[in-house]
Amino acid sequence: MVTCGIATLASREQSFRVVLDHLYPQVDKVYAVLNGYEEIPEWLTLYPKVVAICGHNNMADNSKFLFVDQCEGYFLSWDDDLVMPSGCVEYLKSKVDEYNCIITLHGKRFGRSTKNYRRDFLFRVHCLRDCIVDVRVQLGGTGCMMFHTKDFHPSIGDFGEPLMADIWLSAAAAKAGVKIMAVRHTADYLTYIPPVDTPIWNREHDVEFQTGVVNNFLKINSPNY
């Protein structure tokens, strides 16, 4: 069983539909949180595997994990601006089975602490750039991530302030002692659809607070590499 959690905005309806078209045949169920929608769009009735609810964006990116508590099996968290190729889910599943941990195509590795988690890191694996080897990271990108609930089963209660899903997920993983692996891929593996609004990674954040949360879990997730 592969369940996908995805959150989107009304302003991104066109890109969301493109993304859904590509991931839908590869999964068994999709939980979609439609932020800013007044009602479920009629076209979604063509996707019977999708369970959709309207939201007010108060949870922002955390919404991808709104239903994770009731999921069993492989859980895929995905962003509404990343188009996956055919076979992507099978590839990620194979990596979950290989490492028995959280798998992502995007992430960062730090030392034992960071002064600014956005700029101060050892290296970053980017989902839209070449990654030639599988490598362990401490902060995983939830926009292109998969895990099996037997290895790691977060709860929506693990997520605090919105716009920090990557940080909260990584903190929960550190607490549970579950590693995060960024796996190899080519720069053109995923297709990025630039959003019409401001993407999360380019918005104003309380970087000091977020860096503090990162440093807290780095204390328990800084193995000798």
Image (spheres, helix red, strand yellow):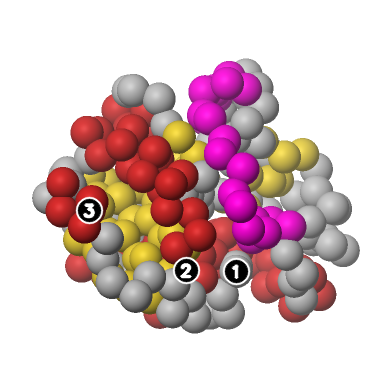
C-alpha distance separating marks 1 and 2: 7 Å
How far from the left and from the top, in percent, is residue 55? 38, 75
Label 3 neighbourhood size at 10 Å, few (<14), some (14-19), many (20+)?
Answer: some
Q: Amino acid at mark 3?
A: Leu
Q: Amino acid at mark 2?
A: Asn
- Comparing labels 3 and 2, the label whose residue is closer to the camera: 3
- Give the magenta range: 183-202
Residue drawn at x 53%, y 30% as measured from the top left: 191
- Provide the residue designation for mark 2: 62
Report if residue 199 lies within the magenta region. Answer: yes
Residue 163: give its label.
1
Residue drawn at x 61%, y 43% as measured from the top left: 194
C-alpha distance separating marks 3 and 2: 22 Å
Q: Earlier in the sequence, mark 1 or mark 3?
A: 3
Q: Quadrant of residue 188?
A: top right
Q: Amino acid at mark 1?
A: Leu
Q: Quadrant of residue 94?
A: top left
How far from the left and from the top, in percent, is residue 52? 25, 64
Report if residue 188 lies within the magenta region. Answer: yes
- Provide the residue designation for mark 3: 44
